[in-house]
Structures are given as structure tokens and as C-alpha cells.
Image (tube, rainbow, N blue to C red):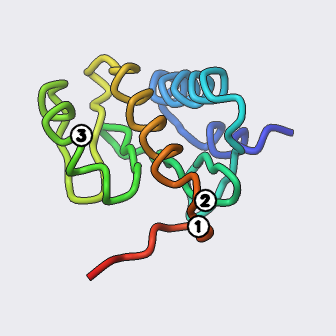
Amino acid sequence: MDVFEDFLNNIEDETHRQRMADILNWVEKTFPNLNKRFAWNQPMFTDHGTFIIGFSVAKKHIAVAPEEKWMDQFVSKVEAAGYGHGSHIFRIGFDQDVNYDLLKDLIEYNVEDKKDCETFWRKKVN
């Protein structure tokens, strides 16, 4: 059984479910080396046991969680794509196109930046 099947089946709105499935399938196809994991009520992808990116569904959007460090490198690209954001996530509205180039850049950045990471989350540096 696919690790995300139950999650997807619980998304009531069919168009929202399909949008999330499309994104998850795209990540899996584009980054076949990443591992799928369902934790903290969200589908996520990991690399050598470290978090790379996660997704969740809200009423009006899909939240994309690439971990907090993404802000420095990508906030201007997220804003240029028309997506709202917080410090840990950005939101793709169900009425917006998915910017797969942006997702690809974020995932590639996290894979490279965390290649030597030995923990699930990045350690905070004060």
C-alpha cells in the first residue's frame, strides 16, 4: 500500500485531493531517491533519514514545508510566484498554478544542504 494513500483518501474535495496527488507524484518521479514518509499528519520526503520537504492541506491551499532555512534563499521566488508564506511554510492556493521549478529548486537545495546532516531536522545555530 502506498504510504500516502490514506492521507489522500481523507481529502474530501476531489480537486484538492487530485492537486495534492499530482504534487506528491511529481516529487516521487522527479526525485526517486527520496524516501516517502507520513508523520505529523503530513506526507513528507526524506533523504538518508533527514527531512527534505513536507506538505499539508488546508481549506484554501496546500502548505509546503521545506524547513525554516529556505527563507533566506527562496522567499523572493515564493513571493514572485504569488504564494503567501510564513517563517516555516509557503502556501499554494488551490486557485494558483504549481510552480514546479520552484519546488525542484527547493528540494535540490535541501538535499545538497543536508547531505552531511545526521539528524532529522537541521540543528539551530544561535
Q: Which residue is mark 3?
A: 74
Label 2 vs label 3: CA separation? 20 Å
Residue 6, numbered label: none
Marks 1 and 2, how far apart at CA:
4 Å
Q: Which mark is residue 120?
A: 1
**Front residue of 92 and 70:** 70
Q: Kindly identify which numbered label has been placed on residue 50.
A: 2
- Count numbered badges in the picture: 3
- Contact check, label 2 and label 3, Cβ < 8 Å: no
Tag 1: residue type?
Phe
Residue 102 left/right relative to 85: right
Secondary structure at badge 2 equals strand
Q: Earlier in the sequence, mark 2 or mark 3?
A: 2
Residue drawn 38% across and 44% down? 64
Near mark 1 (Cα within 10 A), the count class, few <14, some 14-19 or many ≥20, is some
Q: Residue 108 placed where, x, y %?
A: 47, 35
The answer to whether residue 116 is above or below residue 54 is below
State the image coordinates of residue 117 (x, y, percent, origin top left): 56, 63
How many residues crowd around disc 3 within 10 Å: few (fewer than 14), some, or many (20 or more)? some
Left or right, 73 with respect to 42, comes to left
The mark that comes first in sequence, 1 or 2, is: 2
Coordinates of residue 66 in the picture (x, y in percent): 41, 49
Q: Vertical placement of 116 versus 61: above or below?
A: below
Q: Are marks 1 and 2 in contact (CB under 8 Å)?
A: yes
- Residue at 63% in and 50% down: 46
